[in-house]
Image (cartoon, helix red, strand yellow):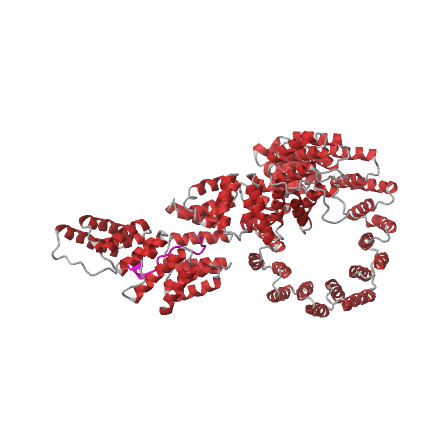
Amino acid sequence: MRERRLFRPLLIGSALTALLALTAPFDASAVTVDQERSASYYQDALQQLEDGDAAAAIIQLRNALQQDPGNVEARQLLGRLYLSAGDGPSAEKELGRALEAQPSDETEILLGNALLMQQKYEEVLSTVSREASTPEQRQEKLLILGNAHFGLDEVEEAEAIYREILSSAPASVGANFALARLKGAVGDLDAASDYLSTALETDPEFFEGWLLKAEIALRHQQYDAAFEALDKADRIRPGNTGAMLARAQALLQTGKVDEGEEQVKAILERQPNQTFAKYLQAGIYFARGDYEEADRVFFTIQDELRNFTPALLLGGLIKFGTEQYAQAEQFLSRYVAAQPQNVAAKRVLALVNLRLGNPHATVRILESVVAANPDDLAAMQLLASGYMRTENYDQAAEAFEKVARSDNPAFAQQARTSLALLGTSLGISGAPVADAEEQAAAQPSGEPGAEPAPAGTLMPADELSRGIVLVLDYLKTRDFEAALDEVESLKSTHPDNPVVLNIEGGIHLARGDEESARESFEKALELNPDFISALNNLDRLDLRAGNPEAVEGRMRDRLERDPTDEQMLLRLAQFLTSQERPDEAQALLDSARGSMPESIAVREALVVSYLTEGTPERAVPIAKEMADIAPENPAVLTFAGRTLLQAEMPAEAVGMFERLRVVQPDSPAAQLLLADALFAAERKDEARAMLVDLRERNPENVPAAAGLINFALSDDQAEEALRIATDLAAQDAVASAQLQADVLRRTGRADKAVAVLSDAFQENPVSPLALDLFLAQRSVGQVEEGIKGLTAWVEAHPDDRPARLALASALIETGDYETASAQYETLVTSDPNDAAALNNLAWLKNELGEPNALDYARRAHDLAPESPEIADTLGWMLVQSEDTAEEGLALLREAATAAPANADIQYHLAYALRASGDQDEAQAILEKLLATDQPFTERDAAQSLLTELRG
């Protein structure tokens, strides 16, 4: 039987609700004593019902039947009461006997409802006939039959019966409701809403109708309407469990986890074994990362929910989170069979099969996914994993190639590394194999810093390279033990291969075994002193240990052996800059100019350093020197011209961009750069003429229009600027609206900018306008309205990553961490390799006190081990626990050494040092940190800590 989101077995009919509309008055003449006693109990039961005490009535009816089992009226009423109380089996027992003793349409209807309640649909069809003595009773019978067909997934038969009812009774509440439920189940929500409206117009007090209206509204993302419908349901039946459950679902769906949890707790206090409430409770625990508690609760209800499809998904995810992979596979397989359109569930099922050592199943699942969704990079990457583990190397290379060509940098870099090791080159004849630096950037999750191949190494598609790809794949899915086993196998046949040793060190590092990691990296360097990745990994270990001198020493030793090692020179200069020693970095780079007369990279780094340190006059001659070395290189000429503009030398910048235009005579970008320089050099007429010419030749050129707008605004011609922006609408309506809004904002009319963007968004609902409208609303204080609008956009366009990122960031700013966390969870689900999103999610979960925060922080750090901000997040979490404080301190040392100017990181290090007992070093860091007026987030906390240390 297929589970339906909108299907709740409901008992519709006047016979169920009119409990006191009984049969003819009881005739007490010519009866036995037992019959008299039975009649007395029956009359007393009627009185108890009038007084509102159904429980007492049930007792009296049982007494009546004990005295006289043939009292059909008492048996029928008892069956009614059981039915009203939701006790289907007891109702079936009593009503079946009543029907056998005295057949009637009324009893048949009641028995049909009792069977429906127990989902005994075949028995309904064999018990309830279509004939009845009154039109009303026939409608009730048809409704029961339709519901039975619907329960058997016989949608067409059910719909035909419902329509048969409407042909004679168009306003039938039951039939309209049933059709609304049916249409909702097949996804036709508009039709469902229409039928439900008819039912509620006929009976505004129809409780089940308001519940269904709330559910449909939620599926339309109409949250206000959903809660309004639930409020009406509450007024009709205050405290009803069904309404409370529906409200809990709505609260959870709208990100109000705390309120939803309170609602669930209230239900469980009244009904501790309420199955659906416990289901929601398990979902809440899972969402908060408490997988063990989620598993404990779910275990108590999993048998009852074996036919409830959403529970199969939740169960599969819970079992996956608790590493019960065999059970996860069972749940997810059943879910995917019922919901084959859920691609995300298929990906999880494929990963579960990898963990179970069943890669053939992974391939089978994902080949169909990728065929239907060729842009699903996560599925393609997992499919490549399946091919690797089934030794289908050609198909693996093909899958990696598709990923490598994608626009996602993290996925593409990993795929390029794998392709290089498989001896391919993206299918391009003569293309170079990825070198060491390119491969170094492709760090899969769980493999921080490990480098597949040394610079200049071309690895053929042999068993070694395939084994290395397999190890990297195990790391990507965080199968550390399997990765170590494969490395041991590779070492047995290639004991002196530095690549294998370096990867081994990466695995140890991911598992937290720094001593073993260092040993592997050092062995790799003994075999190949030029192995940059092993050096990088040792650098990280020394930074963690608070020993930057060792890092610098290794770099200087290499430069002493080879002063022309450009790569090492740049690394040392970058390291010195990160340590707040820019003068030394500049001296190093300036000295290298003599020994490297053709090096563009050295000179570019020196120019950037001078500009960053506020000495552009020193950068100018170096930039000119670069242009002389590479006079035909457009990138060099562009860099030099921009340097001259930043140094406020526009006339010379004009000359540089004129040289660029000679090299690229047909480039609009070169023409725009020259126009900017002419404008800065006060040659406005020439600049304007150039932009006008560019627009005449290319009317849709937005930067040219923006340049002309800047000219108009510089001459205080606001209306002319607005006209230029408006005229662009014929070529690019979206850019036109954006430029109009920019003009209005820059001329003090921000409210009108919001109106322009709002109108444009209504005409062209696209992501750039959704974002710009949100930002404009926020700029005029309409934060709540902006968030509401962007939320609606993201819900309607779930793949719009920039919009979701903007929404998540705004939610953090407003302090709505729970909803922000939900948005970041969606982001990391769609791109598991987004280190920044993982880091932000980890921070949010830590703020919310959720136990899986650390897992996300580790995943982020695995992906971006070089990021001091990400190392700081992980380190800060680790120092909060005594068991992991030492590891946290090491990470904070690494982060603080890599980013000495980041005051928040320095405070975190001081805090960790104080906690470890090193108060002197902590105090020294804080005194240096607070010696200036530099603002930073943790300044007050840092001041308090310093006061405490001094005290």
Residue 314 image position (x, y, % from top left): 49, 46
Q: Is residue 377 left or right of residue 712?
A: left
Position of residue 79 measured from the top left corner of the image (x, y, whole percent): 27, 53
- Residue 536, placed above or below residue 369: above
Quarter residue 153 falls in: bottom left
User: Quadrant where the C terminus lies?
Assistant: top right
Specify the farthest residue to the left. Answer: 30
Q: Is residue 282 left or right of residue 72?
A: right
Q: Which one is nearer the viewer's eye here, 655 or 847?
A: 655
> In the drawing, does residue 372 fall left or right of residue 422?
left
Q: Residue at x 13, y 51 (%)?
A: 33
- Closer to us: 197 or 405: 405
Please name whichever residue, 286 or 233, is drawn nearer the observer in this view of the structure.
286
Q: Is residue 12 magenta-colored?
A: yes
Q: Can the viewer see residue 936 in this picture?
A: no
Expressed as whole percent of the image width and height from the top left, the position of residue 789 reads 57, 60
Residue 251 placement, left or right of 85 = right
Specify start and end residues of the magenta stretch as a single range: 2-18
Number of numbered discs present?
A: 0
Percent of width and height locating residue 925? 68, 36
Kindly identify the residue that appears in the image at 38 percent across and 58 percent down. 147
**Residue 240 appears in view:** yes
Asked if residue 893 lies in the magenta stretch, the reply is no
The quadrant holding residue 532 is top right
Is 728 above or below relative to 151?
A: below
Q: Magenta residues: mostly which secondary structure?
A: loop
* Front residue of this view, candidates 785 and 79: 79
